[in-house]
Image (cartoon, grey):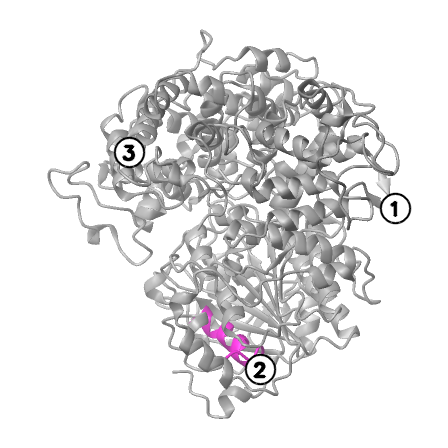
Amino acid sequence: MRQVLTPPFAVYVLNRLGYGPRRGTPFSVEAFNALGANDDARLTAFVDQQLNPSTNPAGDVTDPDVAARLAHENYTTLGKTFEQLWQDHEVNGNPSGGPYTRDLPIREIERAVFVRATYSRWGLFEQMADFWHNHFNIYGYDRYAAPTWVSWDRDVIRRNALGNFRSMLQATFDSPAMLYYLDNYINRAPSFNENYAREIIELHTLGSINYLGANLQQHEVPDIPAGQPGAGWPVGYVDADVYELARAFTGWTFHRGASGGPNTGVAYMIPAQHDIGQKNVLGQFVAANTPYATEHQLFLDRLAYHPGTARHIALKLARRFVSDAPPQELVDHVANVFWQNRMAPDQIRLTLRALLLHDAGPGSFRDIGNFGNKVKKPFEAVVGALRAVSADFTIRRDDSESNSFMDRFRRSGHRPFDWRPPDGFPDDRNYWLGGGAFVHAWRTVDWVLDENTGSNQGDPLAPVLAITQNEFSNSPAEHTPNKLANFWLRRALGWAPDPVNGWAGTPLHTAIRDFMARNTDTVSLFNPDVGIGNGPSGNTAGLGTDGSPNYWHSRLRGMVGCILFSPQFMAR
Amino acid sequence: MSQITRRAFIKGSTLCLTALGGMRLGLHARRAHADWQTGNFFVYVYLRGGIDGLNMVCPIDGPDRAHYEMHRPNIHLRTTGATAALPLGNTHYGLNFAATGLHELYGQGRLAIVHGTGFPVAQITRSHFDAQDYMEHGTPGSNTIGTGWLARHLQATGQVPDSAMIPSLSVAANAPTSLLGRRDNMVLDDPNSFHPNANNGNVDGQPRYKLSTTMTLRQLYQGNDDLHHAGTGAVDTIELVDTLGISSYTPAPGANYPSTGVAATLGNQAKLIANIAKRGLGLQVATLDYGGWDSHENQGDGTQGDLNQNQYANRLAGLSATLHALYTDLAAAGLHNRMVLVVHSEFGRRVRENANRGTDHGSGNPMLVLGGRVRGGQLFGTFGGLGPGQLYQNEDVASTTDFRRVLSEVVAGHLGNPDLASVFPGYDYPGPLGLLPGDPLFANGFDPA
């Protein structure tokens, strides 16, 4: 039983398909509700809008607010091509200092993702970029990932995020960051190194749901029956498929200037290190001496087009957007759409559309009963909070505010691209419940709310006082704990249970109001209907002042923080 | 201490456990000896990535030595010189040269090694993520039970008194799967700055409104579902860290936790376990994770003098130093007899080295068991051999001892919980290996079946 209140459909959708509503933008409750006459119509219109973001001629998703913020001089690598990145940060790269620092690209992207998630109108696209980054997880500070991360993020992940899965798989297969991270760059005949071959099957394509264990051999695996997708292919994989694929990948590496060769980062084959024997991966036979490019194409096709891959991707997408235990009928439907469109250039867009709009009864995406079955991960909680309070904070490199922010966020266990094993950050609810995930996400939000003096950026980063003063008259009599709590609950959560009374009368409102009304002895309460600066002894200074004993301005920000730390906000 | 009295730890309950049958749980709990010495605790150290156990404990003579050198022409441990394997008594095996701390504990009879542990053959998997999932759920071949094995132990044991403030502790940002479903598990990465108030405007030595914030959080998370329990747990931790002054701790002399290098974080985390264990807060289970063992390349052959050139040995040295420091720290407080620590990993690695002086995924692997009561200085289990026909699928060290057997002996013989059927459902425990001296529960004729 979920003990949070169920919000309007718009709030549920905006928290699922992005990072929560931000007032006055196309990704807001008002904008969503203007899209149609009822929730079903609005959902369809919104999903179609989000699945067709504006792009530049190169195919990169564009957003004016994000572009303006990332144009800041502290971002220097985002526009570089792969070749420039390689030359500047790998060939000429140095450990630290100056414009050619090796890890500048990852340092900029790990901060740019906050800017994009916080300000982009294309929330669903940002969620999908995050999804694929985790699906094809690479540790961002890895040796060849760090200097090329701008290209990995842009050319491999984002350009394919709504496109064709087979194309994306190819791009990862050609990436020096991936070939290094999973050790294929030194995978050589005859002894081979299975790491990449195993993970490309287990994590990137078929998934362990289609792993039949260590005890079966290929000839013992039954075939998919006639009349079904993939008919005649083995139903799943065994370790022998991993080993055969590892042999196929032997010699596949990238140019890094070894032995006088070029230093370009481009993937290539060293024939002398390639196993030229015959191979069999998932029923795809390749004769001895087949050219490696043909061999790779056939095997990657088999992996990408296997119906087990469709089931795996469908299940992961459903877990990301719907619930940890999505309805089987929904997963089957989505898997079928993925498989039927396996050659389509917009395969992933079509798959996602099916996931979000297909009605498979209770538990489908449109079922608002799903609200609360996911919890905000630290990144979602912090970005969602920045959006909820209309923060004006461009997180960037070489900026003391941004550094303070990142230092606090890191301890939540969810620093972007900082998951070292290849399976990516967990998507399941249980993993993120409590502990450092909660406390350090909250601490990061609290820091943003309080950062209002001496800031390099806006002053303050989060305009809590200005928003409050804009809402209320200057009369202190108006600034009652009851009214302040009610206003900010509606403002930060994006809705209220009662059109007239708002959140008044709910336990959540009582708790928030009590924070605002609690005397400095932490035991007694001021009258919650008496305005701040208008009350009894000890309660006489105005809301914008921040002196002893009541520190009203700090208290107001603390109250907003408590709303953003509440279960109602953490649920999604 | 008002915060302590307000704390509302949810006593001895986990989610999703009712299906296991309250009747049986109650019966077992009553059978636990009333005079069982409370205060025993267990530390579960999980090495993520699959440690190459064969280069932790390797054959140094006998017929397997030649097979070992043949399978590992570049990365085998030497038997002579500065990086020679450290002989384990008069056995045919030696410890990696980097594990000097562990070797000392073995020599003192405090560290036992169980050869060839892993899954039952039918459930062997060479997937990291499946293997970890199955092990931490305690259910080989399945990950659907909904609770971790340590969570089920804490639920079933009857040995967690209501007065226990911190019955279990995960030193990490997030709890591991072995404690999945345990509501009152303390999850703490570091006691410093573990509270939501980042404001630098201090009032009375506290960040402004810190106390008010925790009071409000407690009010907000009063509900009765997992989200609310998680929030309450976080607030409990915040208050306990503060009230007990947990961020202030000085280890005993001679307990030299690593503070630099690959094990700096691990050292700090282990120190927190000792810190909390010494405070008498009812700690019974603590977990610690140490990753980075997926050594597909350049494990290092150990012949270079600089440990930094030997990634594997360097990492192992960090583990060894950390465990030695933890043991020393606890022993100084007389708590070494209360602790049993198990080092576990999802699988061993292939016997044959790969193309890159590394090793790929395998199966059977040693487990380490450390503690004052442990019958250490001995090898347990069966090493399946490295010769023709002895390897699993001609590739891996054989899995000859179910990992649940080792853990069951600790659960029953050290933690005093006879309800193994709840901890490892479906497991037919064949009885103790003898890692611990006389198991009073079973000696008294208790029938686990």
Work out whether residue B310 can be spotted: no
The residue stretch that appears in magenta: B401-417
**Same-chain status of marks 3 and 2:** no
Toward the left, the furthest residue is A226
Is the C-beta separation of discs 1 and 3 under 8 Å?
A: no
Mark 3 vs mark 2, CA separation in Å: 53 Å
Which residue is denoted by mark 2 in the rendering?
B436
Is residue A525 depicted above or below A478 in this figure?
below
Q: Chain of mark 2?
A: B
Residue A541, quarter of picture = top right
Which residue sits at x=20%, y=51%? A219
Mark 1 vs mark 3, CA separation in Å: 57 Å
Question: Amino acid under label 2?
Answer: Leu
Q: Which of the pair A502/A560 is nearer the observer?
A: A502
Work out whether residue A369 can be spotted: yes
Is residue A480 depicted above or below B279 in this figure?
above
Q: Secondary structure at mark 3?
A: helix
Question: Amino acid under label 3?
Answer: Val
Q: Residues within 10 Å of mark 1 (few under 14, many from 20)?
A: few
Q: Residues within 10 Å of mark 3 (few under 14, many from 20)?
A: many
Magenta stretch holds residue B274: no
Toward the bottom, the furthest residue is B444
Which residue is denoted by mark 3 in the rendering?
A334
**A253 to the left or right of B46:** left
Q: Chain of mark 1?
A: B
Q: Chain of mark 3?
A: A
Residue A370, quarter of picture = top left
Which mark lies nearer to you, 1 or 3?
Answer: 1
Which residue is denoted by mark 1 in the rendering?
B204
Q: Which mark is residue B439?
A: none
